[in-house]
Amino acid sequence: MWHQGLIIKLITYKFPDYLILILHNFLTDRKFQVCVNHTLSSVGNTQAGTPQGSSLNPTLYNIFNSDFLQNDKINYLYAIGSAILKQGSNIKFVIQTIQVQLRRIENWCTSWRVAINP
């Protein structure tokens, strides 16, 4: 989750300034370190995402993805995974419909700096 993008959405959705500041401070200047086979990595700065195990994660995820493409005929967003589901008797129509949705998803992900992991 792109931190600046989340703040933009909070502002757009007219969250109170004090809450935006609290969330900005919660996400900013976080560090991480990885331990593999009892060896610690160097300390890195977190540029995106939310702290692992935070009770705010589901809420922040829902806010960030609240403008993700919605379609009454295709459902595809759940938790940290996504799927495009379409059925029909004409395979060319199904493929065309899914391809249009894939382009829209790609555009949304590019705009909001979301990496797609196929």
Image (cartoon, rainbow, N blue to C red):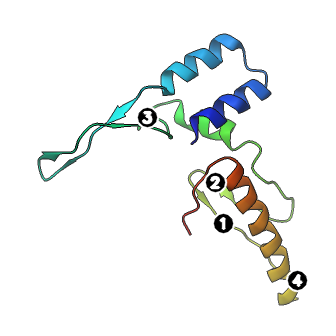
Q: Earlier in the sequence, mark 2 or mark 3?
A: 3
Which residue position is annotated with label 1?
Answer: 83
Residue 64's place in the image compared with 113, above or below, is above
Task: Name the amino acid, label 3.
Answer: Pro
Residue depicted at x 54% and y 64% = 117
- How far is disc 1 from disc 4 in space, using C-alphas? 18 Å
Task: Name the amino acid, label 4.
Answer: Phe
Which residue position is annotated with label 2?
Answer: 78
Q: Earlier in the sequence, mark 4 or mark 3?
A: 3
- How far is disc 2 from disc 3 in space, using C-alphas? 20 Å
Look at the image and tell me in which quarter the N terminus lies.
Answer: top right
Task: Name the amino acid, label 2.
Answer: Tyr
Q: Earlier in the sequence, mark 4 or mark 2?
A: 2
Q: Please indicate whether residue 77 sits to the left or right of residue 103 in the image.
A: left
Circle nearer the viewer, 2 or 3: 3
Residue 26's place in the image compared with 101, above or below, is above
**Mark 1 element type:** loop
Which residue position is annotated with label 4?
Answer: 93
Which residue position is annotated with label 3?
Answer: 51
Task: Characterize the local packing of mark 2: few (<14), some (14-19) or many (20 or more) Cα atoms within 10 angstroms.
Answer: few
Residue 51: x %, y % from top left: 43, 34
